[in-house]
Amino acid sequence: STTGETMGPMDFAAGSFVLFAYPRTGRPDEVEPGGWAQVPGAKGCTPEACEFRDLAADFAAIGYRVLGLSSQDTGHQLEAAERLHLPYPLLSDPGFALATACGLPTFGFEGELLHVRSTLVVSDRTITHAYFGVTDAAAHPRRLLAQRQQDR
C-alpha cells in the first residue's frame, strides 16, 4: 500500500469500501506505449483516480472508504499517489493475489498482464456490486457515488 503497510485478508474483513482496479498509471516523464489508446478502457487511470480523490469525502460520508489497485509496483504507485494528491491508498498487487481471489478480469498488453478497469463495492465482507470493463473512467466514480447514495 502507498501508506507503507502490507495489507492482508483481514484488512478487508470489516467495514465498507470501494476498490477500483485499473490497468496502469502513466508518468508525465514517460511516453505512452503505442496502441495503448486503442485498448478499450485502458486510458483514463489518472482521471478516474482524481475523480475518486475529489469524491472521497462524499464516499466516506455514506460509509465507504476508497482503495485503488493495480499490478504496478509500490514505488510507481507512490509516485502517482503523491503527484495526484490522493487521500486514499493505492495497493500494489503484482502477483494478482487479490485479483485472483476476487475474480477480477485481466488482459495482456505488450507481454504484461494488467487489470481490466473494474470496481468492487464491498460491505462487511460481501461484494455487493461489481463493475467489470469500465470504459468511461472519468464519469464512473460520480455515477457509482450516486448509485450508492440512492441505495442508502
Image: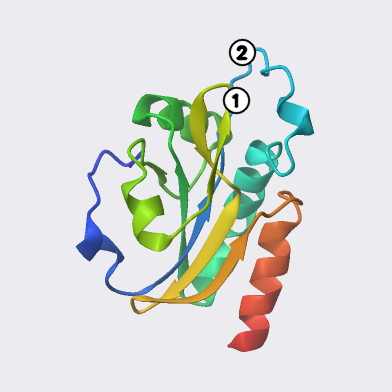
Report the residue at 22% width, 44% height from top.
Answer: 6
What label sits on residue 128 in the rendered view?
A: none
Amino acid found under the numbered disc labelled 2: Glu
Instruction: Say left or right for 1 vs 36.
Output: left
**Residue sitting at 52 percent across and 52 percent down?**
105
Q: Quadrant of residue 15?
A: bottom left
- At which x and y percent is residue 22? 56, 44
The answer to whether the residues at label 2 and label 1 have Cβ atoms under 8 Å apart is: yes
Image mark for residue 26: 1
- The location of residue 139, given as percent across then percent down, is 76, 56
Image vertical order of residue 36 relative to residue 44, above or below:
above
* Residue at image coords 53%, 54%: 20
Residue 5 image offset from top left, x and y in percent: 23, 43
What's the mark number on residue 30? 2
Report whether 149 appears left or right of 56: right
Q: Quadrant of the C terminus?
A: bottom right
Left/right placement of residue 97 relative to residue 65 reads left
Packing grade of label 2 (10 A; few <14, some 14-19, many >=20) is few
| Three-letter amino acid code at the position of disc 1 | Gly
Front-lying residue, 118 or 63: 118
Q: Quadrant of the N terminus?
A: top left
Q: Look at the image and name its color scheme.
A: rainbow
Q: How packed is label 1: few (under 14 Cα within 10 Å), some, or many (20 or more)?
A: some
Check disc 2 and report its element: helix, strand or loop: loop
Q: Position of residue 116 (x, y in %)?
A: 58, 47
